[in-house]
Amino acid sequence: MKVGVSGAGGRMGSLAAATIDAAEDLHLIALYDVYTTGSIAGLTISQDRASLDGCDIVVEFSRPDVVMDNMAVWRSFGANVVVGTSGFDTQRLGALEDLWANGPGNCLVVPNFSIGAVLMMKMAEIAAPHFAVAEVLEMHHDEKADAPSGTAIATAQRIAALAPHQERRVDSEELHDGALGADIDNIRVHAIRLPGAVAHQVVMFGGEGERLSITHDTSDRSAFMPGVLLAVRSIPAQKNTMAVGLETLLGI
């Protein structure tokens, strides 16, 4: 399968490109990044989207501010697209569903390529109906382009969908705006940005006399690469033209 990487100049994009190039069953043929020049695996990073025309699969790791424009172009190419860019809220996912309503090619949006993070979200879904209140805290490196992370948003949305009784039970007055976190479907989400961090998330549930915490830590971006390869290899046979997450690929 011929694969191209968009956002190839970033941390995740460059690592994904090198990983795909090393896979014997995949053929890395093109790299694109509007903000970066250079080369990976002997391929020059182009600043022309047309360089990805002809790819069977495009792996998208561009910044959130340009990703939707990119997606429309990859759709016009008829490519299958694996999206790793974060920040896909309900509105953006709806736009992709409309974009992929007809025609060839599939789209898979992956909030987190870490197998452990996917399992963390699944465990949070299991716990959600049994607790009155949930909050999410995430921490990433200080150069991450957006906050909160796509994983934190997805976690909050999944908890809310399974536990509509979730509500903010806090009487504290915010002395500074945002002190109690962002409100995502009645779930409070807190974001921290620190140098030296990669990815960290805690999902906290509170009930009468008890608290449950589900924690996942990523210490190196190599943890995401098995999920990237799984998504790339699976997307051509994806049953639905538009899907979100690795869960169905993992059988959970």
Image: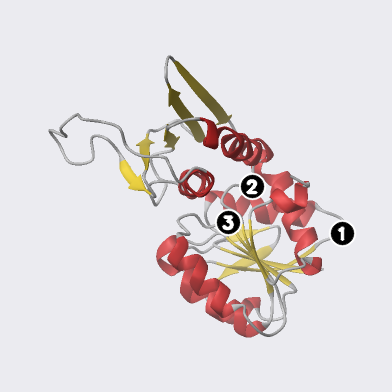
Between disc 2 and disc 3, whose residue precedes?
Answer: 3
- Marks 2 and 3 in Cβ contact (< 8 Å): yes
- Residue type, mark 1 in image: Asp
Foreground residue among 88 and 196: 88
Q: Is residue 215 left or right of residue 65?
A: right
Q: Of 6 and 65, which appears nearest the observer? A: 65
**Tag on residue 235?**
none
* Residue beneath disc 1: 25
Q: Is residue 171 left or right of residue 243?
A: left
Image location of residue 153, percent across then percent down = 46, 48
Q: Is residue 3 left or right of residue 10?
A: right
| Alpha-carbon span between mark 2 and mark 1 | 20 Å
Q: Vertical placement of 56 versus 137: above or below?
A: below
As drawn, the residue found furthest toward the left would be 175
Marks 1 and 3, the one that precedes in the sequence: 1
- Name the residue carrying label 2: 113
Q: Which mark is residue 84?
A: 3
**Quick one: label 3, few (<14), some, or many (20+) residues within 10 Å?**
many
Provide the secondary structure element on which disc 3 rests.
loop
Q: Which mark lies nearer to you, 2 or 1?
A: 2
Name the amino acid, label 2: Phe
Of residues 45 and 210, the one nearer the viewer is: 210
Between the C-alphas of marks 1 and 3, the distance is: 21 Å
Q: Residue most toward the top? A: 209
Query: Which type of secondary structure does the marked residue at label 2 adopt?
Result: loop
Label pair 2/1, CB-CB below 8 angstroms:
no
The answer to whether residue 196 is visible is: yes
At a point 43% along the width and 25% down the height, the residue shown is 206
